[in-house]
Image (cartoon, coloured by chain):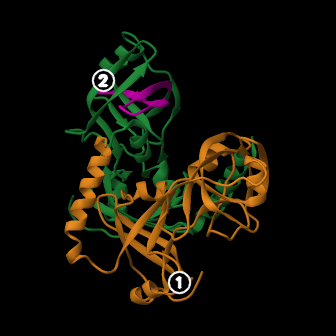
Chain colours: A green, B orange
């Protein structure tokens, strides 16, 4: 265990100690780096016919996991290596990057919710057995909060609603246009990308709070 | 002129067309990437005795400029190449990085205002003629707004005051703890780093607005 790990464990322990008096409105944070969800067809092209992903570790959302496998993303201006694949396979390939990755790749990906891929940018993915050029599917993820339907009821929000979240600290502030994504099979977690987490001075041990509860979708 | 430049020029032109009806409270944004300010002593060690920097382009703050020269930053876990030097020389070397750079380098730099370097982290800088290990001076810049004393009066704020800024758009929100830095010789500009700008979906053509005007410093 190195120093950074030790400090994170210590922070976790201190946070657990104070959890008895914890505000029930505090929402855990999941910080996402760039990653790829692959369709089975694209997986075959990149890794070989009938390839099965190797689970590296489970993610907080039930059934979702990070894989050993990575790909290289190639755009008109540059490439980004070792981009992690998340499993399981999906019906359509989706590539989620940071806004800064767009500058490296030479594209300007739209801010979209996962699965909302119509008229988004394409990109080239390169794996050990071949490459795939997708015509759409490259996005920067819109901030969102996963939760169960029970969580939604407890927090007084509903699936599809757009809220603002408050973040405390020296680098604190408010992020608007955070989408509520409530299903029976989701764990409570606010998903931000690494740039969004860094800009507010938070990490995967932080908690955020819903601020405004405007009714209705976007 | 490539496509990206063309789009930026077009955006600039459209924004200029609408400037007649522009809100006087809108503040231009300057987006900073990682950069280094060098003392003459450290410059001598990195580039050779009596070395003079080569100006690449003027920055918006009077007398400040980006230089042709770059250095490599080296921390316990990694290195970052081609980090731009900004001139002129300062009394003390200051290295301003992104929060994500801290992970690459293996350090956790404090959020500080420029010049407030006491008890900050050190780092190693490598140039073509040698290397320098500074004992302090590595920071992530705290968000701030440069302005003239006249601007401060117009905006109803004062030097040292801490405000919040509002940002519009799909990735919009509010950044708290933004420091006002008013001097007779400053241009009105809100300084954010690339992660902060990306997280709010803005760039160097964007405008922000001061939200709360809490009196007093931090």
In this orientation, which residue lies closer to the viewer: A83 or A184? A83
| Residue for badge 2 | A133
Give neighbour class at mark 1: few <14, some 14-19, many 20+ (Cα, 10 Å). few
Q: Position of residue A181 (x, y in %)?
A: 31, 50
Secondary structure predominantly adopted by residues drawn in magenta = strand
Does the image show residue A112? no
Q: Which mark is residue B97?
A: none
Asked where in the image residue A63 lies, by quadrant, the reply is top left
> Which element type, helix, strand or loop, lies under badge 1?
loop
In this orientation, which residue lies closer to the viewer: A160 or B98? B98
Asked where in the image residue B135 lies, by quadrant, the reply is bottom right
User: Distance between the Cα atoms at labels 2 and 1?
Assistant: 54 Å
Q: Position of residue A28 (x, y in %)?
A: 49, 55
Query: Residue at the spot x=32%, y=44% of the render?
Result: A108
Does the image show residue B6? yes
Q: Is residue B212 left or right of residue A134?
A: right
Q: Which mark is residue B184?
A: 1
Q: Is residue B167 magenta?
A: no
Image depth: mark 2 or mark 1 in front: 1
Q: Position of residue B143 (x, y in %)?
A: 52, 68
> Which element type, helix, strand or loop, lies under badge 2?
strand
Q: Is residue A89 magenta?
A: yes
- Discs 2 and 1 lie in a common subunit: no
Which stretch is magenta?
Answer: A68-91
In this orientation, which residue lies closer to the viewer: B148 or A184? B148
Query: Residue at the spot x=41%, y=14% of the render?
Result: A51
């Amino acid at each position: 265990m190195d120093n950074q790990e030790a400090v994170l464990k210590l922070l976790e322990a201190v946070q657990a100690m104070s959890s008895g008096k914890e505000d029930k409105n505090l929402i855990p944070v999941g910080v996402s780096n760039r990653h790829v969800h692959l369709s089975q067809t694209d997986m075959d092209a990149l890794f070989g016919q009938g390839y099965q992903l190797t689970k590296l570790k489970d993610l907080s959302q039930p059934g979702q996991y990070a894989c050993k496998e990575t790909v290289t993303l190639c755009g008109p201006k540059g490439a980004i290596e070792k981009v992690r694949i998340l499993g399981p396979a999906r019906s359509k390939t989706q590539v989620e990057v940071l806004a800064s990755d767009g500058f490296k790749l030479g594209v300007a990906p739209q801010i979209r919710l996962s699965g909302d891929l119509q008229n988004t940018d394409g990109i080239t993915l390169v794996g050990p057995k071949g490459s795939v050029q997708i015509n759409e599917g490259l996005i920067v993820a819109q901030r969102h909060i996963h939760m169960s339907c029970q969580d939604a009821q407890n927090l007084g929000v509903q699936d599809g609603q757009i809220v603002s979240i408050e973040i405390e600290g020296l680098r604190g502030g408010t992020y608007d246009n955070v989408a509520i994504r409530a299903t029976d099979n989701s764990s409570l977690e606010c998903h931000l990308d690494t740039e969004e987490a860094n800009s507010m001075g938070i990490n995967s041990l932080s908690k955020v709070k819903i601020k405004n509860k405007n009714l209705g979708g976007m």
